[in-house]
Image (tube, helix red, strand yellow):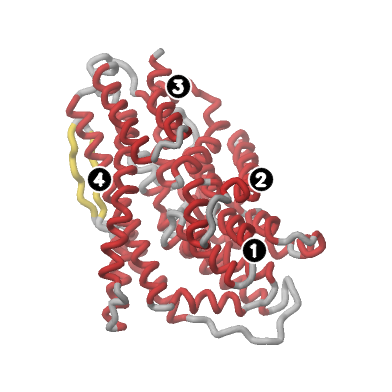
Amino acid sequence: MDVLLALSPLLLLVGLLLLHVELWKVSGITLMYSIALSLVHWGMSPLAALGAHGKGLFVAIDIFLILFGALLFLAYLEQSKKLDRIKNYIVSISPDRRVQVILLVWFFGSFIEGAAGFGTPAAIIAPLLISIGFPKLQAIAAALIGNSAAVVFGAVGTPVSVGLAGLPVAGIAPQIAGYNFFIGSIVPLLILSVIIRNKKEFIQSIPFALSSGVLLMGISYMVSLLGSEFPSLLGPLIAGGIMIILLDAGVFFKREKKKHEPFPLRAFLPYLLLIFWLLLGKFQPVGINVPLGSNIGHSFSLSNPGIAFFLSIGVFLLLEHNTYGLRAKGKELAKKLLLPTLVIFFITSIVQLMIHTNTNTTGMQSMLELLGGAMGTYLAFFTPTLGVFGAFMTGSATVASLLFGSLVYQGGGLLALLVIGAGIGNMISLTNIIAVQAAVGEHGQELAILKLTLPACLILLVLATLLGLIA
């Protein structure tokens, strides 16, 4: 009975979502239920319950800073036309649709994921694909499928650094990148499968697609040794540069006589400065420990990636003597982010309550300890599916990690597989599908898009599950 009660907050959350209740209402109702359950049945200390909410609030603030900074950074790139220069350069490399879609979706899309994340890449890449002649539904599906492997590290490592906050994740980045190498390397093939209908053309492109996958995932693994903040930023930048050199040399396809546009170094400078600030914060971390009561605390890092975004934007605004209307854009973004941040606060508080219900007067184990014990050795089998499910329901790998990370850890499962699953589930997230449709002026095509993305999702999920069983 206690195990069922421990599971009940998650069941309530899922049940309300299936009834198409809005996520902020779902998370708010579930939080109120979880508070009552913690205090009444578990006899949780009121001070511990308050501390759990404090932890949830600080995590939500951390994520707000990252989200706000990432989206403001992207707005600066758009308003200063730097994003257009990068796009035009990529398109000029080859007229071959197979090359264009892989360069835009796989390399450039992964790079945007590393800088902004949170569904941004697909919303940017799909319109770009349509603008150069790709059909709408295929463009949307390709952009969504491509926005998967890079999502495991997301915007400057958020699914790990924030999604698994409070868990012992030191050194986990290389483990995630290692798993991702075996799973993510086939993603370019899956991207082409929804774009290229000619069997001969598809077969001809297999060496190029697999090489693109192995190159990006391999370099991302090497970069992961620096930490979770860098694989989705440096990996695509380095791997994309190498691939362009190989294409120029005619390694995969016949070399084009026409020279492509020169590399837009000035357009990439804000990214390079961002990487510098992130590296500086990595090797010179500064944090403030905030005690919240009952052995609950939070370390507020002044090396938060959101601050790196602000510093990068500020330097270029000063150099270019132009604000690009970012003050008004900042106000608009802040208003848009209030509701998502509230949802994250609710969900994080639910998770923290489930973790700390062992601070009680009844002597019971915490909710997550009970659930982990019940799942036992089978947890590794279900862990990738939990990640896919979490991302599908919430639209965020970070929130999926927040939701299930502690459960997986308490049960002895593999946190790396949870994050891998969340990245895979990103391509079928309804919120992401709706957002991409809005970006291209489409609506009501959710089922048609799911028919194109679901097979790719299932293929990757099977591979991740097999990997979990072996591990």
Q: Earlier in the sequence, mark 3 or mark 4?
A: 4
Q: Does 335 sit above or below residue 412?
A: below
Which residue is the site of mark 1?
Answer: 135
Q: Secondary structure at mark 1?
A: loop
Q: Nearer the viewer, residue 226 or 116?
A: 116
Which residue is the site of mark 2?
Answer: 455
Q: Quadrant of the C terminus?
A: top right
- Residue 227 visible: no
| Comparing labels 3 and 4, the label whose residue is closer to the camera | 4
**Cβ–Cβ below 8 Å for labels 1 and 3?**
no
The number of discs equals: 4
Q: Residue 35's quadrant in the figure?
A: top left
Q: Residue 187's quadrant in the figure?
A: bottom right
Q: Secondary structure at mark 2?
A: helix
- Is 98 on the left or on the right of 165, as rendered? right
Q: Does 98 sit above or below residue 214?
A: below
